Amino acid sequence: MKFRSVRPADAASAEVTIVPLFDDKQAPRTLPRGKRAIVERLAAERGASTLYNVFTHVGGDREGRVVVVGAGKRADYDAERARNIASAGIKSLWKTDAKTVAIHVDATSIGEARAAQAAVEGAHFAMWRPEAHRSKPEDRRLPPLATVTIAVEGNVRDALRRGDAVGQAVNTARRMANEPANKMTPTMVADEARALAKAAGIDIEVLDRKKCESLGMFSYLSVAQGSHQPPQFIVLRYRGRGGKGYDLGLVGKGITFDSGGISIKPAEGMHHMKADMTGAASVIAAMTAIGTLKPKVNVIAVAPCTENLPGGGATKPGDVFTSMSGKTVEVINTDAEGRLVLVDGISYVQREGATRVVDVATLTGAIAIALGNHFSGLFGKPESFVEDVRRVGADAGDRLWPMPLTDEYRNEIKSDIADITNSAGREGGAIKAAAFLDAAVEPGTEWAHLDIAGTFWSDKDRSQAPKGPQGPSVRTLVALAERYAR
């Protein structure tokens, strides 16, 4: 699928025209007369359309297919709305044979470049479906789109390129998270990462169990003890400015299946734990976009991958391990395993020279209780860096809500027999999990933790994506790399 931009007057040849319709019922003045008349007639017949509702008119060769998408109030139009309008329009074409589409955007309030990039991302989001393993091709069919044209007056080439890279990266994360655990083991994640790294021109190294032992990653390795699948600690490196150190370190939780271990989960909903590696998928996918866009920044990303299963060798509640930072960890609940792998990932990227660290994880059900399914939890220090991440994330299209993290919570994770414990009661569970990660953050390191347990998956179809994995945080990670480019 290729993207290009043309002046609105030159976009008439596309088979499909996607047009936003605001509550003022005014068709874009840049539309050709015939298509403008179609939009105005639909607006008159249907009234001011509900946000993201789609009306379609199929005309002759001259008009083609006109897809009108409800855009709500014109004053509320922003990049997220532009993204969702494009996605809703493309999703309406799933059962068609459309090869060329023109998307008209409204650049009045957000500018042409921003509107164009959002539309490209939205088009990508709609070109992914979760039914990857259905045997009938028609059940997973997508339109054979070859060219998507963004109708704007100015030069938005860079915006199209960025939207293309970011959109593909989000879909990569969604595809990986959607795979069943038997088709996305730690070794398979590593193989996928190697192929993606090669295509994006970034360096990759995969550390095996023996190497992780030599580095003292016994907190991470404790999670892998019950599985027959070998752990794989994936390291990706991008050096856009050269020199030493890394301006940004990314850490993604890579539990390719989480049964809870000895502290086993209830059976209901456990199948969703195939996507407990969404954090790992997010950082791997984000690095592919960073490699494609080539900002002048050095970034290191790690994905500590393993399964968390019960077994004769599995970690038992009450066991104690030494993490890479040197802190000892008492494992009270083996289902609080994500933090055990993340602390060693955080220590690793700091040891490699990362001055800022952002970790992404489907870490706690508690964050979904607190925030529901529309915001990811945001923790970290110092407050200036946390606010920077929140602002960058909002601008990129990820909704992050800052949460408290004070010494009271740090005191609650102190163990009676070791330095820290991985479980300290249900109250404030998401905050205590963040406090556990904070124990691995060294003085002077800027750190943010994104708990995406409430946003990584949707059980409902949404305007910007079908139900299934949603790919949160990828856009934020790419935008942060660009934010810290020198």
Image (spheres, helix red, strand yellow):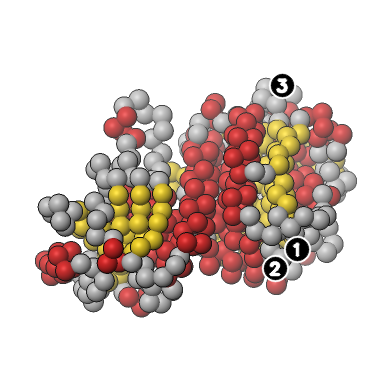
> Is label 2 in a helix, a strand or a loop?
helix
* Crowd class of label 3 (few under 14; some 14 to 19; many from 20; radius 10 Å): few
Q: Position of residue 203 (x, y in %)?
A: 71, 42
Viewer-closest of 125 and 203: 203
Q: Quadrant of the C terminus?
A: bottom right
Q: Is 223 on the left or on the right of 65, as rendered?
A: right
> Is label 1 in a helix, a strand or a loop?
strand
Q: Are marks 1 and 3 in contact (CB under 8 Å)?
A: no
Q: Position of residue 27 (x, y in %)?
A: 22, 71
The residue to which callout 1 is attached is: 446
Work out whether mark 2 precedes mark 3 in sequence or the reverse, and give the earlier one: 3
234 up-or-down from 343: above or below: above
Alpha carbon distance from label 1 to label 3: 40 Å
Q: Amino acid at mark 1?
A: Glu
* Crowd class of label 1 (few under 14; some 14 to 19; many from 20; radius 10 Å): many
Q: Which mark is residue 425?
A: none
Q: Is 119 on the left or on the right of 439, as rendered?
A: left
Q: Amino acid at mark 2?
A: Phe
Give the residue drawn at x 31%, y 42%: 143
452 up-or-down from 269: above or below: below
Give the residue drawn at x 67%, y 44%: 202
Work out whether mark 1 precedes mark 2 in sequence or the reverse, and give the earlier one: 2
Give the residue drawn at x 44%, y 61%: 118
Q: Which mark is residue 312?
A: 3
Q: Are marks 1 and 2 in contact (CB under 8 Å)?
A: yes
Viewer-closest of 74 and 441: 74
Alpha carbon distance from label 2 to label 3: 43 Å
